[in-house]
Image: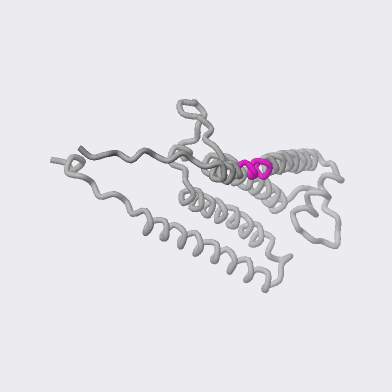
């Protein structure tokens, strides 16, 4: 009969070091505040777009300048390019907001404390298997999506950008893509998929 070694009780120092994880709590609360700022920014841009659609010259000028367009003559009506750039900007805000949610919820669950959301009807599916590696892959994928939106906005409004800026943004996007692929490949090497057991194989 083997003697099972009893787990040692944590010392006061180890408890103190482990409790230091709560220092990250203000960081996640700050990200929630940043999320609120993005929500406000989204609605400001959306209101400007709606007002411009009804012919408000101030709103039209605001979204024309915010979309990075340049012209010697002030805009008199909404164009398809302007609408597309504004809508892409709104999508960009939503994707960054999704990225913030992944960092806030996933980071808190991974590095601070369990949320106890098991059985909650609104629990995200990805939260069941969240860990540092999965979180990095998901963040990398989200960053690629955000970079793609920025690159699309640049190409739509290419006449207001220099060739150097277009090339630089394309190179940066490719760098993000390669980085995400490298992170995913490294995670696959560290955590290889399990081979199916004899019970899992079809008979």
* Residue 20 location (% of width, % of height): 61, 44
* Residue 201 location (% of width, % of height): 18, 43
Magenta stretch holds residue 101: no
**In which quadrant of the rendered image does the N terminus lie?**
top left
Q: Is residue 27 above or below residue 81?
A: above
| Residue 5 relative to residue 160: left or right | left
Q: Tell me the magenta residue range.
A: 22-28
* Residue 108 location (% of width, % of height): 57, 41
| Residue 102 shows in this picture | no
| Residue 183 shows in this picture | yes
Depth check: 19 or 71 in front?
19
> How did the renderer colour the structure?
one colour
Q: Which residue is drawn at 48% across and 52% down?
A: 137
* Residue 4 location (% of width, % of height): 30, 39
Q: Residue at x 68, y 39 (%)?
A: 29
**In which quadrant of the rendered image does the C terminus lie?**
top left
Depth check: 168 or 187 in front?
187
């Amino acid at each position: 009969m083997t003697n099972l070694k009893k787990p040692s009780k944590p010392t006061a120092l180890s408890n103190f070091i482990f409790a230091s994880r709560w220092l990250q709590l203000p960081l996640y609360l700050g990200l929630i505040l940043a999320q609120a700022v993005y929500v406000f920014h989204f609605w400001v841009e959306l209101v400007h777009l709606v007002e411009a659609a009804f012919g408000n010259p101030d709103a039209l000028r605001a979204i024309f300048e915010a979309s990075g367009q340049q012209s010697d003559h002030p805009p008199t009506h909404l164009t398809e390019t302007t609408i597309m750039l504004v809508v892409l900007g709104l999508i960009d805000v939503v994707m960054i907001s999704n990225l913030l949610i992944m960092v806030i919820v996933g980071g808190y669950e991974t590095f601070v404390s369990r949320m106890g959301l098991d059985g909650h009807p609104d629990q995200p599916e990805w939260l069941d298997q969240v860990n540092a590696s999965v979180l990095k892959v998901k963040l990398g994928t989200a960053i690629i999506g955000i970079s793609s939106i920025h690159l699309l906005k640049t190409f739509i409004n290419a006449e207001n950008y220099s060739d150097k800026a277009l090339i630089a943004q394309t190179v940066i996007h490719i760098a993000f893509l390669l980085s995400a692929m490298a992170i995913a490949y490294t995670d696959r090497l560290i955590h290889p998929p399990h081979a199916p057991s004899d019970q899992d194989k079809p008979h």
